[in-house]
Amino acid sequence: MARGSLIVFEGLDGCGKSTQLDLVFDWMQARGLDCVKTREPTAGAWGQRIREMARSGEPVAREDELAWFMEDRREHVRDMIEPALERGTFVLCDRYWLSSVAYQGARGLDAAEIQRANEAEFPDPDLAIIFEISPEEGMARVKARGGVGEPVFEEVDFQRRVQKVFDSLDRPWIVRVDARGSIDEIHERVLSVLTERVVRPE
């Protein structure tokens, strides 16, 4: 059986990646493709701790925050991602270790070292789509949708620093997609990338 593909959806807060992931999942299911969707932080114990911290507005030490993300990812890869890939499944993941590089790098840690540590331990994506949008527009979208905010990460100056790290990432499996426009327009751009890179058109 051929190994599955890990497809990662990345970008600033408010970029629309979660919406696009759901649309891709529905598109794959409609074509009978074996696919699962997941996210980081996960719903596990480490992921819940991260989300509680982000919502509280009280950041922990940068090093501890990164360690929590690494533990969450360790369990995620071991228990969900790797078994699915071994079954030949498409795994659609809302954030992965590129977000650790960008977000914890923006918090002042060494982004290059975070990337080295993650690449040494975890599988590379087969495709990582980075949805590009300005920090200002991303934060405007976050405010417009309401819901529970994450003040630790959802701040324009911080998002600008995150953007700089995302802009610096360079791997052959990274594709950048313009996240401006309607949901349908962005979805068409995503499908174009998918059918070129990982999903063979019928």
Image: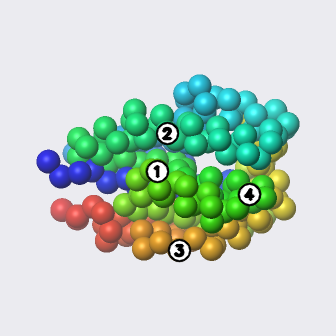
Q: Which residue is mark 1?
A: 121
Labels 2 and 4: the sequence-earlier one: 2
| Label 2 or label 1, whichever comes before in sequence order | 2
Q: Residue at x 66, y 62 (%)?
A: 111
- Distance from Cα at disc 4 to Cα at disc 1: 18 Å
Q: Quadrant of residue 11?
A: bottom right
Coordinates of residue 61 in the picture (x, y in percent)? 80, 42
Q: CA distance from mark 2 to mark 4?
A: 20 Å
| Location of mark 2 (residue) | 74
Crowdedness of circle 4 by 10 Å Cα count: few (<14), some, many (20+)?
Answer: some
Instruction: Give how far apart the Cα atoms at labels 2 and 3 are.
Output: 23 Å
Amino acid under label 3? Asp
Residue 116 left/right relative to 139: left
| CA distance separating discs 3 and 4 | 19 Å
Report the side of 10 relative to 193 (left or right): right
Asked whether the beta carbons under mark 2 and mark 3 sit within 8 Å of each other, the answer is no
Residue 16: percent from left, percent from top: 59, 55
Nearer the observer: mark 3 or 1; the answer is 1
Residue at (63%, 74%) from the top-left corner? Answer: 168
Is 177 situated left or right of 87 in this image?
Answer: right
Question: How many residues crowd mark 1 within 10 Å: few (<14), some (14–19), many (20+)?
Answer: few
Q: Mark 4 = which residue?
A: 109
